[in-house]
Amino acid sequence: MTPNLDKKPYLVDAVIGNSRFLASLLKTGRLVRFWWPHVDFPQHADTIRAGIRMAGSGERTSWFDSVEDGWTHESGYVPRTNVYAVRASSPRYPVEASTELYAVPGEDVLVFDYKFANTGDAPASFSFFFYSSVAATESPFYHTTQFVPHADALVHYRHRYSFAVSGANVCTKYQACHAWEAACSGELNGDDVQMAPDGALEWAFRDVAPGETVRLTVYLAAGHRMEESLTVLAQAKEAGVDSLRERTVRYWRDFVNSASPCPVDVPEVRELYERSVLAMKLMSDEQTGSIIAAPEFDEHFSRCGGYAYCWGRDAAFITTALDKAGLADMSTRFYEWTLTAQDADGAWQQRHYHDGTLAPNWGLQIDEGSSILWGMYQHYLALPEGERGEFLTLVWDAVRRGAEFLVRSIEAENGLPMASRDLWEERLGQHTYSSAAVFAGLQAAASFAVLSGEAELAGKWNGVADTIARQITSLCWNEEKGVFYRGVNLSVDRKRYEEAAGAGLPVSSFVDAKGYDRYRLGFDPIVDVSLLGVSVPFAVVPPNDPQAVRTADAVEKALTVDGVGGIKRYEDDTYIGGNPWILTTLWLAQYRARNGQAAEARRLLDWAVAHRNGAGLLPEQVDCHTGETAWVVPLTWSHAMFILAVHLIAEAPAEGSAAEAEGAVRTSS
């Protein structure tokens, strides 16, 4: 049995970190991935395991961070922190293992704090094994693992990355490299150094009395050179685990206390609100301010295109939620970061790495840059008046160039932004949601122009926005279905084009500059939850406008999933099985709240609360058959939409009847 990257699970249960480290965990306490010194790239973990071997001839190590050998687990976060705690027990062994895992704020160290309790009625002797295979930068090449005696540590290193692993107690045995089978058999051979990524450490405990608990803390320290990682390790050991834990718990509770309190006085809502604040902090990179969509889980792009990137669209919703939660400094850091990611022509591309460089993508997605402009202005309005001028100065040049790019993107034929990828990154066309985002981005830029004394630019940008609004409400309106079209001029293949033409639907074709035939449908009639964006948040029409009301009703009717409930993305969605999403359900909740339908909004919010995972985190999707977590944990956008929905519900006017008003929302005093 040799650990390898291919065996990593898609779904994880929890995350820990400190905005330099980020690590994903299973509910068993097994750490499956970790990133350092940025939260998106690079990732370094191959396999990290923890197990015990009872004393006695022929005994093999039992890895208690799995469900093998009958191990069961109780796990969850220490309240109001990003410390993850796990208790493992098995009827086969008289030892119960309790683990706390966390990253120390401000330090380049992960802590694995183990306590072993003898639950039997006789003294127990056993060894604890920590196996670490660290494939720095996920590369299969050029690794070395070395045992450093003076530090009593295994050091894994490759190029600019060094990770030192050691315990608070002196180890009993060790093996540098090719150590998996040796760790399983309990026969570490004392090899000092080899060119391989793995190694193992053993600590022996003798005659632990019934009811007695022994403790062993393992530290994983990071640096860009071996000397750096060993220095960080030594500092962690000197501070001691009790001090590091107290510092970590205090940091996270102070962070939660620094946020605006949850405005809905319901325990489950408040808990998820606080967990959302904590999760969003972990997804924000300390050094750059970029915010990722989720910790990566599909590094081979086997079922999707990856998630550990910064999307301007996601981040605009996330920063608006951070502002609502009173964490405006994080939003400011993000908008400082956007200045590093903007193209020379003023565009922002689909997604980026933490350093602003372009990430793998499917081409221009015009709602990304326009969402950034919209988000910038939302953030400006959320800032104290004394800080607004500095922020305006910071972003004005980027706003001007971004708005001019959007103006240049307008197609003369219909007054809508040019064809680009839709927000789901699946189709090419002139999408209604994307057009609404461009409308809002230009309006935001015009507001900045007024503040900057650029009245002519403000008039120009507002004029283009007004044209987009007229076209959305006329050209993009499907009166027959009572809902907006998802878009116009949708690019399709020749077969679909011919089928549509045969059915008498409006189509068009043309030959591009390289001689390729291109085909388009005149209208995309699929009902899509993103059509809510025309009113919430982009305000092309107000929520009580008949077009907005009919669209929201059509969305709820067409996209509610039978049995499980929740709202899926669009009618013919097949991604990961066509499941309801958390963020889409909360999007409809936000619309209902904005339209004064607080009870309906609360029902949708409660659905999201009921479908958080066991650690209290919000996934992207919920399985349409079982109601279980289906994909991506945690999704930062889901948590942002939850915070936004909570605030909008709390601000919603009371509804008609006393019963509805009583059941809608209880706000804190």
Image (cartoon, helix red, strand yellow):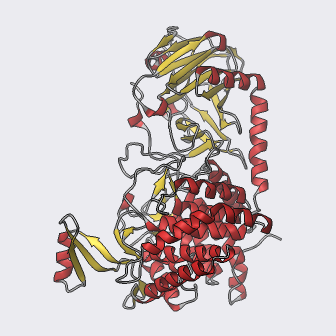
- Residue 45 in the image, given as x and y percentages of width and height: 50, 32
Residue 1 position (above or below residue 151): below
Q: Residue at x 55, y 90 (%)?
A: 545
Q: Quadrant of the C terminus?
A: bottom right
- Residue 473 in the image, given as x and y percentages of width and height: 46, 88
In the image, 200 versus 623, the foreground residue is 200
* 193 to the left or right of 114: left
In the image, 425 versus 641, the foreground residue is 425
Residue 411 position (above or below residue 282): below
Q: Residue at x 59, y 50 (%)?
A: 283
* 412 to the left or right of 188: left
**Whether residue 529 can be seen here:** no
Q: Quadrant of residue 656?
A: bottom right
- Residue 39 in the image, given as x and y percentages of width and height: 57, 43
In the image, 17 versus 330, the foreground residue is 330
**Whether residue 263 can be seen here:** yes
Residue 449 position (above or below residue 194): below
Q: Quadrant of the N terminus?
A: top left
- Give the mark count: 0
Q: Quadrant of residue 663?
A: bottom right
- Residue 29 in the image, given as x and y percentages of width and height: 58, 36
* 68 to the left or right of 148: left
Q: Quadrant of residue 647?
A: bottom right
* 461 to the left or right of 104: left
Considering every residue shown, the one lying at the far right of the view is 669
